[in-house]
Amino acid sequence: MDIGTISLVLLIGLFILLAIGMPLGLASAILAVLVLVMKFEPALLSNPLSFGCPDWYTEANPGVRCTLTGRPGAGALNILQQKIYGVMTSYVLISVPLFIFMASLLERSGIAKDMYSSLNVWLNGTRGGIAIVTSIMAVIMAAMSGIIGGEVVLLGLIALPQMLRLGYNQNLAIGTICASGSLGTMIPPSIVLIMYGLITETSIKALFTAAFLPGFMLASFIIIYIIIRTQIRPEDAPLPKPAEGEPQGYDKLKLFIAFLNVVFFGAVTALFLRALFFTVTGQNAPLDDAIEPIFLGTADYLPWFAGYIIASVLIAFFGFGRERSALAWEMGKGLVAPMVVIGVVLGSIYGGITGITEAAGMGAIAVLIIAILRGEANFELVWDSLMRTMKSTGTIIWVTIGAAALAGAYTIAGGPRFVADLIVGSEMPTMLVLLSMMFILLIMGAFMDWVGIVLLIIPVFLPIVLRLPIQEIGIFGELNPRHVATWFGVLFCMNMQVSFLSPPFGPAAFYLKSVAPAHISLTDIFKGFLPFIGIQLIALSVLLIWPPIVSVLL
C-alpha cells in the first residue's frame, strides 16, 4: 500500500479513536500495528488467516513474504521494538518523575503558600498587585519544577479566592492564573523541553538556555498586560486597604533593599564556607594545568567573600538598623526556600556540576529537606506525593510507548520523507511552511496532549524545518544553522503554551475548574483566556519573526 493512503488512514483513524474516548497511548499503539500491516503485510487485512505464514498460505501464494508474522523478532517489528527500547531506557527520562515528585512536594507543603504571602507583602500596594504576584509566583514555580498542571491548581487554591475577595475582575483573575500557571512549558527546567530533546536528540542544556529569554519575555508580556489593563480600568483591580502599621511607598522600598542585603549576606556566607571547605580539604589545589580550578572555590576568593560579608553586616546594623533588617527578613523570608531550590536545580546544571537528571534528583531532595526543616514533612505528605508522581509518570510513559511505536512505524513506512517531499515540493515560501506547521500544531494542541504531539508530529516536522533555506527563516536577523533544531524546539513549546488554554480541551481550564468556586463555569474560564491567548500568539510571532532571540544566551 502506498504511503499517501497510509497517511490518510492514519490521520482519520487517530481522530476517530480519540473522538470515541480511547486513551492516546492505546490508540497510538493500535495505529502503529495498522501502519506496519498496511505497509509490509497488507494481506492480513483481506485474509486474517494468513497470520503467521502457515504452510498452506505460502504454498497457495508463491513468492509472498510475511515480513511481520513470518519471523517474529525480525524485520520492521524488530526495528520498532529497538526504537521503543531506546526511548524508554534513556537516562534523561528519569528526570521526568523526579521533577513531578518535586512539584508534588511543593504543592503539598507550605513553601508555595509562604512564597505567595511574601510576594504579596511587597506588591499589595500596587494596582493589580495580586495578579502581578500570581504571575511572578508562577515564574518562580516554573523555574523550580517545570510542571504545568500542579501550578494552575495551586494558584487556583491560593490566589483565586484572594483576588475574588478583593473584587478583581473575574476574567482577569482566571486568565492570569491559567496563563501564568502554564509557564512551566517554556521556563526551564521544562518537561516539554526535556521530552523534545529526548525525541530529537537535541541538547537539553541548549534548549534550556535558548528558552530563557522567550520564556521570560512571555511572562513579561503577561505582567505588562496586567499593569496596562488595571491602569486603564482601575475597577478591574481595586486596591486593598493597607493594614494598620504596614509600611508604605518609599519605606517599603527601603525594607525590600534591606531584605536583599540579608539574602546577599546568606549567599556570600555559603560561598565563603564552600571555598573554605575546598581549601582545607585540598580539593582546589592545582594538580594539573589542564584541569580548571573549582569555580568560586579557590583560596583567592576567600578575602573577597570575607569583605562582602563584613560590608553586608555593617549595612544591616548601621545602614538599616537591626530591627528594620529583622522586619525586612520577616516580610520576605518566604522567598528564600524557592531561591534555594532554583539555585540547586539550575545552578547545578549551568554550573557544570551535574546533568539534567541529577539536578532533578537534587531538587527533589532539597525540597524534601526544606519541608523537614519547616516541620511539614510527614509520611502522608511523602506518600501522597509519590502516588501522584506514579500516576502522572505512568500516564506519560504509556503515551510515550504508544506514540513512540506509532512514530517509529510511520518512519519505517517512509512517512516523514513523504510529508517532507510533499511540503518542500509544493514550493511554498518558507514562512508559509512554518505558519502551516504552527496552524497544525495549534489545531492538534486543542485536541491532543502535548506528549502525543511531541512524539507524533515533531519527528515529521523537524526534518522538514532542517531542509528549509536558513536565510529565509524569520524576518529580522539570521539564525545560526547549528541552532535550527533548538529554535524549533522553543517555538514548539511556545505553541504548546497556547494549547493549554485552547478550547475545547484546554487542560488549564479543567485544572482550574477542579478547585474554582461552583459559580465559575467552564465557559467563564475559557472566556477569561481570550486576551491571554492573544498575548501568547504575539510571543509566538516574535519567535517566528526574530529567530536569533534563542541564540542570545547560547
Image: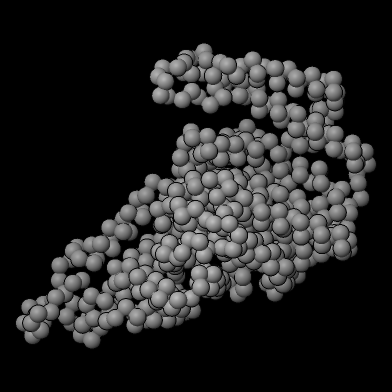
* Left or right, 263 with reference to 39: right
Residue 437 seen anywhere in this rendered image of the structure: no
Residue 41 seen anywhere in this rendered image of the structure: yes
* Left or right, 267 with reference to 487: right
Residue at 16%, 74% in the rendered image: 66
From the viewer's side, name the closer residue of 50 and 43: 43
Residue 13, picture quadrant: bottom left
From the viewer's side, name the closer residue of 482 and 128: 482
From the viewer's side, name the closer residue of 155 and 414: 414
* Left or right, 171 with reference to 495: right
Residue at 59%, 53% in the rendered image: 549
Q: Could you tell me residue 217's position as x and y percent?
A: 66, 54
Q: Which residue in the rendered view is the most extreme toward the right?
A: 244
Q: From what the image shows, is residue 415 above or below residue 156?
A: below
Q: Could you tell me residue 533's position as x and y percent?
A: 67, 67
**Which quarter shows the N terminus?**
bottom left
From the viewer's side, name the closer residue of 246 and 273: 273
